[in-house]
Image (cartoon, rainbow, N blue to C red):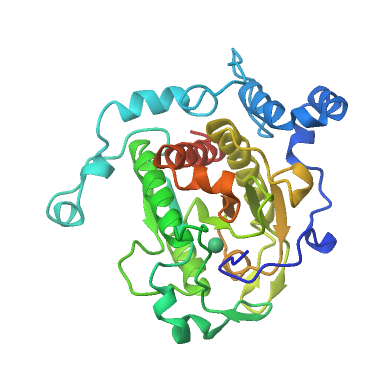
């Protein structure tokens, strides 16, 4: 429940977008089928991702893979992934010092020339710096705490550890596809950064896409993932009018690919089963001028979700889903 901004009341009607959910824009046939069999949602989401390529109007994949677990094959960028991960990427193997002395070879891959900012939610050191992270910062429309500690599983696995691990796995995958990846922090600072600085890093990097990685902390029985999209807000330094549309596209693509890659269903406790929620109270979104979403990968306080979140193999699938969504969004 502890986002890096405080959460809204669950299912707050005002925070849910009136726009049609992402799945309705993909296939009316599928929607009709889903209406007849709502319990088949998870499998249906997977099928949607495997058979359609989203709102961009691209042609469907030539062959649909079975809806049983197919992580690592099919959907956006799968062919590229196999090709590009077979050889080390220049971006992944070039250190900062090396690039200072010799120009790096041009990046290759579907994301060459693209910049992606990954924001690992919270910081494992925040617990020890409560006065610093409790400081109020301006988010344009309001003032909020600089940052929060994040949640933990019942056994003590910290959300901040989870977000950093998934972010690093995502970075490796994105770099293998040629992207330049910028982190908001990489366990290289004792706390934070504050939410306004997290947004500013994406803005100053002129990121083509920004993803803030989180896991939720709500009561047991609440399960699944959701993507948080920016609402249209304007006030002070906040103006999301130009990013609402592309951020939704980014979020829809990550939702579909995340479901396919991990086998997880959209959250059963908010978002009306779409896996998408629109919020106007998150500084990290309000202050962004670049397409940006948050992903809540699961509920750390639910034992079944926690079993997934604490699994390195599952976290790799999560990173693959996030990566494939970004690749789809950026047209790779
Ligand atoms: Zn969080």
Q: Quadrant of residue 160?
A: bottom left
Residue 209 horizontal/vertical position (percent): 51, 51
Is 328 above or below relative to 44?
A: below
Is 229 above or below relative to 3?
A: above
Q: Quadrant of residue 33?
A: top right
Residue 212 horizontal/vertical position (percent): 52, 57
* Residue 206 visible in rendering: no
Which of the two residues, 200 or 304, is positioned nearer the viewer here? 304
Q: Quadrant of residue 163?
A: bottom left
* Residue 202 visible in rendering: yes
Question: In the rendered picture of this protein, how many numbered marks are placed on residues?
Answer: 0
The quarter in which the N terminus is drawn is: bottom right
Which of the two residues, 241 or 287, is positioned nearer the viewer here? 287
Name which residue lies at 32% across and 30% down: 85
Name which residue lies at 45% across and 47% down: 310
242 with respect to 29 (left or right) = left
Residue 204 horizontal/vertical position (percent): 44, 65
Q: Quadrant of ligand 1?
A: bottom right
Is 104 above or below relative to 12?
A: above
């Amino acid at each position: 429940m502890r986002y890096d901004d405080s959460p809204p009341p669950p299912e707050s009607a005002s925070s849910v977008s009136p726009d049609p959910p992402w799945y309705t824009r993909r296939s009316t046939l599928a929607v009709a089928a889903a209406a007849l069999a709502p319990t088949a949602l998870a499998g249906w989401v997977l099928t949607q991702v495997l058979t359609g390529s989203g709102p961009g109007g691209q042609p469907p994949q030539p062959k649909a893979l079975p809806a049983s677990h197919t992580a690592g094959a099919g959907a956006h960028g799968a062919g590229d992934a196999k090709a590009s991960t077979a050889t080390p990427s220049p971006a992944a193997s070039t250190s900062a010092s090396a690039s200072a002395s010799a120009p790096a070879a041009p990046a290759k891959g579907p994301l060459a020339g693209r910049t992606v900012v990954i924001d690992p939610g919270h910081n494992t050191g925040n617990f020890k710096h409560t006065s610093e992270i409790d400081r109020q910062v301006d988010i344009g429309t309001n003032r909020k705490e600089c940052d929060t500690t994040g949640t933990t599983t019942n056994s003590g696995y910290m959300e901040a550890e989870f977000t950093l691990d998934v972010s690093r796995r995502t970075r490796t995958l994105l770099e293998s596809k040629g992207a330049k990846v910028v982190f908001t922090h990489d366990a290289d600072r004792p706390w934070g950064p504050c939410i306004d600085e997290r947004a500013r890093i994406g803005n100053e990097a002129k990121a083509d896409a920004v993803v803030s990685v989180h896991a939720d902390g709500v009561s047991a029985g609440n399960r699944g993932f959701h993507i948080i999209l920016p609402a249209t807000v304007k006030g002070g330094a906040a103006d999301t009018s130009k990013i609402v549309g592309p951020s939704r596209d980014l979020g829809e693509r990550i939702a579909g690919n995340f479901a396919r890659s991990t086998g997880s269903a959209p959250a059963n406790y908010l978002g009306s089963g779409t896996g998408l929620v629109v919020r106007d109270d998150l500084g990290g979104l309000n202050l962004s001028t670049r397409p940006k979403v948050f992903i809540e990968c699961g509920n750390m306080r639910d034992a079944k979700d926690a079993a997934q979140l604490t699994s390195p193999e599952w976290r790799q699938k999560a990173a693959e889903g996030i990566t494939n969504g970004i690749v789809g969004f950026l047209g790779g």
